[in-house]
Image (spheres, helix red, strand yellow):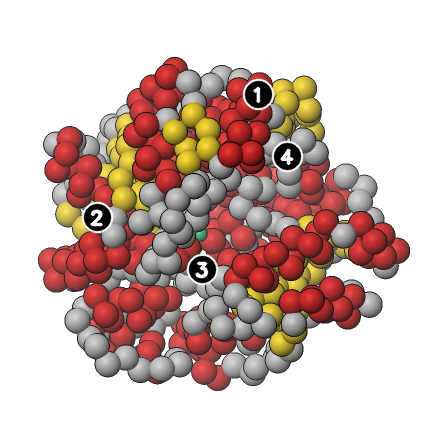
Amino acid sequence: MNYISTRNNNLRMSAAQAIVKGLAPDGGLMTPCVIPTLPSSALHSLADMNYQQRVLYIIGRFLTGFSTVELNQYINAAYAKEKFSHPDVAPIHRIDECTHCLELWHGPTCAFKDMALQMLPHLLSASLEKTLEKRTACILTATSGDTGKAALEGFKDVNKTCILVFYPKNGVSDIQELQMITQEGENVDVCAVEGNFDDAQTGVKKLFADKELEERLTQRGYLLSSANSINWGRVLPQIVYYVSAYCDLIKQGTISAGDMVNFCVPTGNFGNILAAYYAKQMGVPIQRLICASNSNNVLTEFIETGVYDRNRKFHNTISPSMDILISSNLERLIFEISNHDDAMVRGCMNSLGETGRYEVTPFVKNQIQKVFSAGCCTDEQTKETIGTVWKEHGYLIDPHTAVAFHVLQQYRDHTGDMTPSVVVSTASPFKFCAAVLDALGISELKHGTDILDQLAQVTGEEVPTPLACLKKKERRFHTVTEKEHMMDQVLNMLR
Ligand SMILES: *Cc1c(COP(=O)(O)O)cnc(C)c1O
C-alpha cells in the first residue's frame, strides 16, 4: 500500500514513512493511494468478532509492511482491558428505536482521542524501526487540555518514544491539570507555561522550526515529532469504530447487513468524521454523514456553500475541543472527493494560507453534499440538549456529544429522514462536570475533584475510574516556565 501527498500524486511513501513523517514535505497530508474495500461477506464475519479482532482486520488492510503478529501485539496493548473499562471498547447505547449513541470514551482519559492515541505510539515506534530511523522520537505537544493527556497516556512507556507536554498555566481546568501532573511513566514530562494556549502553541511551533535545536537533538539521538491529528496513524484507528458500530447494530438485530445508517459526528479538525467517510468508502452502508459544529461553524458554512472562510470571530464555547477555525483534515476529504485532484487541493490550500479563504468547484461541492449534511448549535442549545436527553432518556451526555444530538434533531426536523442514526459520543460527561451541572440547573458548583462527586450525586451516575483515582495520585510534575524558556525544558528532558 502506497501513500501519496494530497498536494502531489507523485510524492509517494510507504505506510511506515507516512507515519514517521506525519506531514508530506510539500505540506500535504499523506493519504492512501487506494482505499481498500471490504468483500461483501466481511460485515457478517466482522459482526462475530470482538473489537480487537475488528481492528486487526481493518487496519491490516492499510498497513502493508506490518505483520499480523506485530499488529496483534500493538492492538492488544492499545485496547487492553486495563486501558478500556468497557469489554466492547466502543459500545453502542440505544437511545430510541432509530437513535443510537457510539460511546468512544471508555479509554484511560475518558475521551475519544484515546481511540487513536492508544494505537499511534505503537505504530510510530514500529515505523521508526521499519524506516531504519535510529533516533528516539520525542513528541512535543501544546495542549488546551484533552489532547495532551491522551497523548501522555498513549506514549507512556512505549519503546523508542518520549513525550513532553506544555499546557497553559491558567488555561486548563483543575481536573485537566491534575490529570496531567499526576501522569505516570518513565518517558513522560509535563510543564506549565506562563500565559494562554496560544503562547504555549506558538512556543512549540518555534521549537519545531529551530534548526539548531534539531541539530543538537540529533547529536543526542532524538528526533522531534508531533503526533497531531493529521498523522495517518491517528486517522486510521478511527475508521475501525465506524465499521464496528455498524457490525454491532447488525449483531443486536437493530439492522440487517446492507441497511443504510447515518452518523452524526461532533467535529473540530474534521478528523473523526473523515474516518467515517473512509469507512463508507470501504463499503460500510452509510447514507449520510452529518457534521455537527458549535458556534465556530466554519464547516457548516463550507458544506452548505462550498466556501471555506476562517476570517471570522473565534468563539470560546462549552465544547472547547471543537473550538477550531482551521479544520486541517478537510484537505483529505477534498482530495478524495475530487478523485485526487492534487492541483486543485494545492490551489485551495495556498489560498487558505494567503487569504484565509477558498472556494471549491461546483462539482466538488455537489459531491460533498451528496454525502454530507451539516449543522451548528449555540451553547444555550447545547445545554438545553443535555437537559432534555437526561430528562427524556435518562442518558447523561457531555457538551460535545450534545452538539451532535442537537444537530441530528435539526437535520431530522428539516429533512424528515428517519434512517437509523448513530450519534458519536466523544467524551464522558464527567470530563466536563461544570457545563453539565450547569445544564442540569445546578448553580453552586464544587471545586477541584469534588465536582466529580457532585455530578455523581446529582445524577446517580458513577465517576469513571480514571477520574475517580485522581485524588489519590502522586503529583509528579511541578515545573512552570516562561514561554521564552521552553527550549530549556526540552534540553533538560533529553539530556
Ligand atoms: C478532539 C475532540 C473532538 C473533535 O474531533 P475532531 O477529530 O477534531 O473533529 C470532539 N469532541 C471531543 C471531546 C474531542 O476531544
According to the picture, the residue beneath numbered tag 2 turns out to be 406
According to the picture, the residue beneath numbered tag 1 turns out to be 342
Residue 305, quarter of the rendered image: top left
Q: CA distance from mark 1 to mark 3?
A: 37 Å
Left or right position of 412 against 202: left
Whole-percent x, y for residue 352 in the image: 51, 33
Left or right position of 221 against 364: right
Q: Residue at x 56, y 34 (%)?
A: 354
Give amino acid for label 3. Answer: Gly
> Which quadrant is home to the C terminus?
bottom right
Q: Which mark is residue 107?
A: 3
Secondary structure under the numbered disc 2 in the rendered image? helix
Give amino acid for label 2. Answer: His
Q: CA distance from mark 2 to mark 1?
A: 35 Å
Q: Residue at x 65, y 67 (%)?
A: 483
Give amino acid for label 1. Answer: Asp
**Mark 3 or 2, nearer chain start:** 3
Q: Residue at x 51, y 58 (%)?
A: 147
Residue closest to the eye, 196 or 94: 196
Query: Which of labels 1 and 3 is toward the front?
Result: 1
Give amino acid for label 4. Answer: Gly
According to the picture, the residue beneath numbered tag 4 turns out to be 27
Secondary structure under the numbered disc 3 in the rendered image? loop
